[in-house]
Image: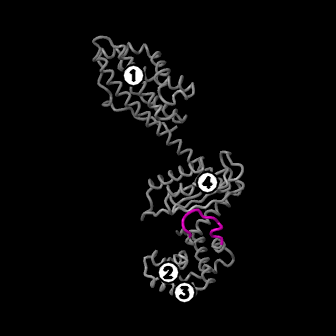
Amino acid sequence: MAYEERSQPASDDRPPGLSPAAAALAARCEAQVNELTRRMARGAFEQVRGYTELPGDVKDVEIAATARHGIRLFLRGAADGSRWDSLEYFQERAAQRAEEGMPLHLLLRTYTLGARELWRALREMAGPGEQQALAELTEALFTATDQVVGAVAESYLDERVALASERHEQNRSRARALLDGRPVVDGSTPDGPVLVLFVRFGTPAATDGPSPVTVRRLLRRVQAALDRAFDTEVLAVLDGDGGHVVVPGVTEPPARLRESLRETAGPELRLAAAAATTVGDVPRAAHLTSEVVRVAAACGVRPGIHRLEDVLLEYHLSRPSEGSARIVAMLDPLDDRPELVATLRTHLEQRQDRRATAHLLNLHPNSVDNRLARIQDLTGLDLADPRDVALTLAALLLRDADTGAVTE
């Protein structure tokens, strides 16, 4: 559990010493602790939505025991001056409730309702002339409830964060094992088909890249969108650029997936999907989806859901072969001219539309013509020749594959 011992509250947080009258009132009420606990568990707590659905042992044993401990701790401390502000017990119980999945609002209301019932008992017990003693105990009860509720909420949330982090890492480990073709450690290897997705967010990054907080928020939103779209908790290995998603038992992405992810990750999102017939086929499907997205981006296909059929020729041209090195070498004369490579790539992505190329590169169309002419002079490739266009496209795709470059 995420519970760790916390320091006791500073002495300044404790109420001033109680008068003998207040101590006497608390001592008389201490004799009714068991009856008061039963009244809480069987009456007050049942007002809380969802309480009656809890397991019997949780209601009748765990919560009742915590209430009894809290009441006795407060009254005994008020009666004899012993410590009543020890929070470790409540923190441990809060972590346990979090692990069991008890809603936080329900847990906190048991404490606030318990404080109200204790105050009512003190009020009923107070006799004539004990108004000041009751006021002292009421102030002390407010202080104690504030400290306990704060500690309980903190421990509960710490435990939930730890549990979520542990589950997230377990799911990432399962996904990595499936993507790498390794056995799943926990033995939960899926049977039947597996849908593999590759997602590239394509969101513009700041000069130094997006902040870690921004990336974490994006990944949480994307995970939630994926879970909603597939109506299950999917396995994902994602970072700030994107990554792979594995969904056992599914062969096709749902129709709402693209729009759901676009709303979350932006309009530049790219996505490819491939079905693996068995878990052993997952690595192939993973490689295929990432390659389809890479080729689609390099060829200027608009962001969206990409299929292999959409980039079939380009995909074929980007496959290494015995002639790959010679094809890539055709662009070697441009190694020291990155602006010419960018112009060439953009020109091909825009289907050789010089005005569109000029607009994207913030150039005059004549400047684009001059750069294309310089490219032809250096490489000998004529972009008016369909064969040379195919060679140039293959060279760019193969260069990307060799360097792992990501081109949007």
**C-alpha separation, residue under disc 2 versus residue under disc 4:** 38 Å
Question: Which residue type carries mark 3?
Answer: Gln
3 or 2: tag closer to the N-terminus? 2
Could you tell me the amino acid type at mark 1?
Phe
Residue drawn at x 59%, y 47% as measured from the top left? 233
Please give the residue where the numbered disc 3 appears in the rendered image. Answer: 376
Type of amino acid at the residue the image marks with label 4: Pro
* Mark 3 → mark 1, Cα distance in angstroms: 88 Å
Q: Which residues are magenta?
A: 301-312
Q: How many marks overall?
A: 4
Residue 354: give its label.
Answer: 2
Residue 32, quarter of the rendered image? top left
Instruction: In the rendered view, tell whether residue 7 sits above or below residue 291.
Output: above
State how far apart marks 3 and 2 are (Cα): 15 Å
Q: Is label 1 in a helix, a strand or a loop?
A: helix
Sequence-first tag of 2 and 4 = 4
CB atoms at circles 3 and 1 under 8 Å apart? Answer: no
Answer whether labels 3 and 2 touch (C-beta < 8 Å): no
Q: At which x and y percent is residue 300?
A: 55, 71
| Rendered view: 72 above or below 343 | above
Residue 373 seen in the figure: yes
**Label 2 element class:** helix
- Reading the image, the residue beneath label 1 is 74
Q: CA distance from mark 4 to mark 3?
A: 46 Å
Q: Which residue is mark 4?
A: 254
Q: Quadrant of residue 16?
A: top left
Q: Position of residue 362 (x, y in %)?
A: 43, 76
